[in-house]
Image (cartoon, grey):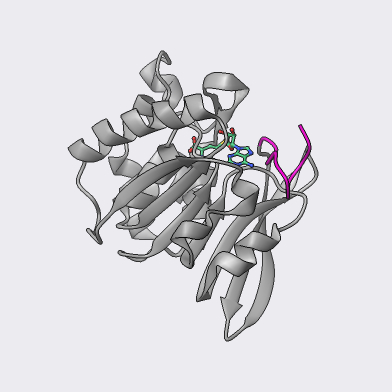
């Protein structure tokens, strides 16, 4: 998967590639044959949600520039797979999920898996999964050095700019319900600069500052 789907498609950051090698993706999709879990496709999780294709997970992680010890806010815990990749890079992650059932399952898998694998770099890595409407961010843990949104948003919720440290980075799929672009928002000396990366397709970010049900 790392050679064929990630490196060849242009993911270059060696730390990201190593983290993708270490996190056992099949553990986050119970009941799926192991080979299928590593195909470069999105996979179904519980509750009609999806776990992104490995290429998108790797690309988003690369765009987020995760140094050891950074404080990351992830929106949309889902299976917990992306959070595990971030923690393996040494991030301290707060991950917000609106579904209590998904959050509970992700907590268990993360506790098992993160206990077994070795971090690429250890920066007090940890994942805290919380339940709530992630379109409002998670003010208690702010400011965050990085914010990663793993559901499709119509625009950047105001809370993210407010809860982002300076300097800081947001990676978010922006677009309509069908098609989005990974978008990077960089904050530096009070200014926000937005750039667009690859096309993608995520499930909708549902909430007060996202899409309606
Ligand atoms: N990062 C996940 C994939 C996320 S799929 C992984 O690695 O598996 C998108 C997730 O966002 C779903 O679990 C969905 O329930 C969640 N979601 C949608 N709107 C949300 C909101 N407003 N706040 C928190 N989570 C939300």
**Is any part of residue 200 visible from this angle?**
yes
37 on left or right of 180:
left
In terms of image quarters, where does ligand 1 lie?
A: top right
Q: Quadrant of the N terminus?
A: top left
59 on left or right of 194:
left
Is residue 35 shown in magenta?
A: no
Q: Count of labels shown?
A: 0
> In which quadrant of the rendered view does residue 28 lie?
top left
Q: Over which residues does the magenta segment extend?
A: 203-213
Q: Position of residue 49 (x, y in %)?
A: 59, 27
Q: Which residue is at the front of the view, 202 or 37? A: 202
Q: Position of residue 178 (x, y in %)?
A: 78, 37
Residue 61 versus residue 49 in the image, above or below: below
Q: Which residue is at the front of the view, 188 or 141? A: 141
Identify the residue shown where x is 50% and y is 29%. Answer: 100
Residue 107 versus residue 194 in the image, above or below: above
Identify the residue shown where x is 59% and y is 47%. Answer: 134
Q: Is most of the magenta stretch helix, strand or loop?
A: loop
192 on left or right of 59:
right
Identify the residue shown where x is 63% and y is 52%. Answer: 136
Q: Position of residue 207 (x, y in %)?
A: 70, 41
Q: Position of residue 156 (x, y in %)?
A: 71, 58
């Amino acid at each position: 998967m790392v050679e064929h789907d990630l490196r060849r498609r242009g993911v270059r950051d060696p730390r990201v590639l190593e983290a993708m090698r270490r996190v056992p993706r099949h553990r986050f999709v119970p009941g799926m044959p192991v080979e299928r879990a590593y195909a470069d496709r999105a996979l179904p999780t519980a509750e009609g949600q999806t776990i992104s294709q490995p290429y998108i997970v790797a690309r988003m992680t690369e765009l987020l520039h995760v140094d050891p010890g950074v404080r990351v806010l992830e929106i949309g815990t889902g299976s917990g797979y992306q959070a595990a990749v971030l923690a393996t890079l040494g991030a301290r992650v707060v991950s917000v999920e609106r579904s209590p059932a998904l959050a509970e399952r992700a907590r268990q898998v993360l506790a098992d898996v993160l206990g077994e694998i070795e971090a690429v770099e250890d920066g007090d890595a940890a994942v805290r999964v919380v339940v709530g409407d992630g379109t409002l961010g998670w003010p208690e843990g702010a400011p965050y050095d990085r914010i990663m949104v793993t559901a499709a948003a119509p625009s950047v919720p105001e809370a993210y700019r407010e809860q982002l440290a300076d300097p800081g980075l947001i990676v978010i799929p922006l677009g309509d319900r069908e098609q989005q672009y990974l978008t990077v928002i960089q904050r530096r000396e009070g200014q926000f600069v937005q750039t667009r990366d690859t096309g993608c397709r995520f499930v909708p970010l549902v909430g007060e500052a996202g899409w309606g049900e």
